[in-house]
Image (spheres, rainbow, N blue to C red):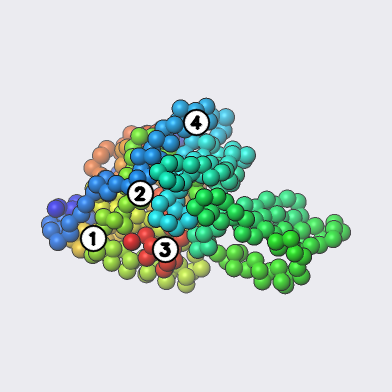
C-alpha cells in the first residue's frame, strides 16, 4: 500500500458565518513515499459493535424532536453529541447536547440488555467535566463568596453521588461564618484542603459537544472513533505509544494539561496522532502520522487552546476564535481556497488526558 501525505497550509480566514476566503497556500509532501507492505490495515468500518446501530437510531430519533437544532440560533450553538465509556466496561455511553445554553444539560444513554436506555441528565452549557483518572463527573456551582459541588460516578445503570463539598471562604470579608464541608461533615481548612487536593490537581476533559449531527460526522463517530485500537497493527501501536510517552514527559516537565486522540484526518483508514499541548491560549496541537514504519511529525502546531475542528465531509481541519487569526489546513489534495464549513464537523485534540494509563487504554 502506498502512503502519501500531502499538507496544505493555507492563510484562509473564516468569517463569523464560517465562509472562508483564502489568500495563499503551500503544499508539502511527506518525507517517505514508498510501499508500506509490512503493515496490513483494516478499515475501522469493518469492525462492528452492537451499540453502533442502536446509538445511530437514538441520534436519528433525537433529530426528529423539537430539541434538535441543526444551525446556530439566538446566539446558541447547534445540537451535538459525544461518546465516552464512563464506566470502563468497553462500551461507550452516548451523550447528547441540545445546545450550549447555560441551563442546557446533557442527556446520557447507555446500552443495557440490547436496548438504549436513558440514565439521566447532567452538566450545564450543554457539557460536563469528566475526571477520567477517577471515573468521576464534576458538578459545581460558584456564587459570590462560596462554592457548592459534587463528584458523581456512573455504575453502568445510574449516576450516584460519590462526594459533596461546599466552602464559603470567599465570604469572610462580609463577616459570614466560614464553613468547609465534605459529605455533610464540617472540617477545618487544612482537613478540607487535604481532602480536595487530589481533585484540584487532577486533569479533566469536557464531554458533550464533540460531534455535530451531520451525516459524515455521525458516520465517523459511530464507525471509526472508537475502533482504532481494534484495527491498528502492533507496529503502529508501538510507534504511537513511544511518541506519546515522549510527549507525556515533556508535558510533565512543563506542567502542562496535555491531552491526545487518534483521528483520521484524510480518510485513509490510518489515524493521525493529535497531541494537545494544553489549554492555554499559547497551546496548539502537534500532529504525527505513520509512513513506512516510521512516525513523522508535521511541521508547526495547529489549533488554539489545544484543539481544532475537523470538517469530516471535506477533510479540512481548522481553527476559529484565535487572536492569531483563523486558518484551515488539509492533508488531502482537495482545493481549500474557498473552504466553507459543512454541517459535519467535530472537535479534535482532547479525547484523552495524556497519562500512561490512558495511553495504554487507547491502544487496546
Q: Is residue 201 above or below residue 346?
A: below
How far is the residue under mark 4 from the one under mark 2? Answer: 23 Å
Label 2, secondary structure: give it: loop
Residue at 68% from the left image edge and 50% from the top image edge: 141
Residue 219 on image: x %, y %: 33, 40
| Residue that badge 4 annotates | 68
Name the foreground residue: 328 vs 363: 363
Label 1, secondary structure: give it: loop
Name the foreground residue: 347 vs 30: 347
Image mark for residue 225: 2
Q: Is residue 71 visible?
A: no
Label 3, secondary structure: give it: helix
Contact (CB < 8 A) between labels 4 and 2? no
| Residue that badge 1 annotates | 233
Q: Is residue 183 left or right of residue 52?
A: right
Q: How many marks?
A: 4
| Residue that badge 3 annotates | 358
Residue 229, image quadrant: bottom left
Amino acid at each position: 500500500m502506498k502512503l502519501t501525505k500531502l499538507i496544505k497550509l493555507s492563510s484562509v480566514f473564516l468569517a463569523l458565518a464560517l465562509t472562508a476566503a483564502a489568500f495563499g497556500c503551500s503544499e508539502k509532501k511527506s518525507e517517505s513515499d514508498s510501499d508500506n507492505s509490512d503493515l496490513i490495515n483494516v478499515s475501522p468500518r469493518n469492525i462492528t459493535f452492537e451499540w453502533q446501530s442502536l446509538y445511530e437510531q437514538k441520534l436519528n430519533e433525537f433529530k426528529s424532536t423539537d430539541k434538535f437544532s441543526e444551525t446556530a440560533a439566538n446566539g446558541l450553538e447547534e445540537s451535538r453529541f459525544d461518546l465516552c465509556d464512563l464506566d470502563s466496561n468497553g462500551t461507550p455511553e452516548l451523550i447528547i447536547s441540545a445546545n450550549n445554553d447555560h441551563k442546557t444539560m446533557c442527556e446520557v444513554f447507555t446500552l443495557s440488555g440490547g436496548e438504549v436506555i436513558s440514565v439521566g441528565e447532567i452538566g450545564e452549557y450543554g457539557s460536563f467535566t469528566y475526571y477520567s483518572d477517577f471515573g468521576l463527573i464534576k458538578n459545581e456551582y460558584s456564587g459570590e463568596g462560596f462554592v457548592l459541588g459534587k463528584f458523581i460516578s456512573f455504575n453502568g445503570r445510574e449516576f450516584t453521588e460519590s462526594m459533596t463539598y461546599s466552602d464559603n471562604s470567599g465570604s469572610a470579608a462580609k463577616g459570614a461564618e466560614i464553613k468547609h464541608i465534605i459529605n455533610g461533615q464540617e472540617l477545618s481548612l487544612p482537613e478540607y484542603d487535604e481532602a480536595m487536593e487530589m481533585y484540584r490537581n487532577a486533569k479533566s476533559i469536557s464531554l458533550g459537544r464533540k460531534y455535530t449531527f451531520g451525516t459524515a460526522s455521525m458516520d465517523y463517530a459511530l464507525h471509526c472513533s472508537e475502533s482504532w485500537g481494534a484495527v491498528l497493527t502492533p507496529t503502529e501501536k508501538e510507534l504511537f505509544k513511544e511518541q506519546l510517552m515522549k510527549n507525556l514527559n515533556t508535558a510533565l516537565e512543563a506542567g502542562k494539561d496535555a491531552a491526545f486522540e487518534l483521528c483520521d484526518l484524510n480518510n485513509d483508514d490510518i489515524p493521525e496522532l493529535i497531541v494537545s499541548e494544553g489549554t492555554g491560549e499559547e497551546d496548539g496541537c502537534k500532529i504525527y502520522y505513520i509512513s513506512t514504519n516510521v512516525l513523522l511529525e508535521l511541521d508547526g502546531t495547529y489549533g488554539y487552546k489545544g484543539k481544532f475542528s475537523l470538517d469530516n465531509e471535506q477533510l479540512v481541519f481548522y481553527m476559529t476564535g484565535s487572536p492569531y487569526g483563523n486558518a484551515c489546513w488539509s492533508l488531502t489534495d482537495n482545493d481549500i481556497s474557498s473552504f466553507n464549513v459543512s454541517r459535519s464537523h467535530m472537535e479534535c485534540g482532547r479525547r484523552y488526558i495524556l497519562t500512561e494509563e490512558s495511553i495504554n487504554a487507547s491502544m487496546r
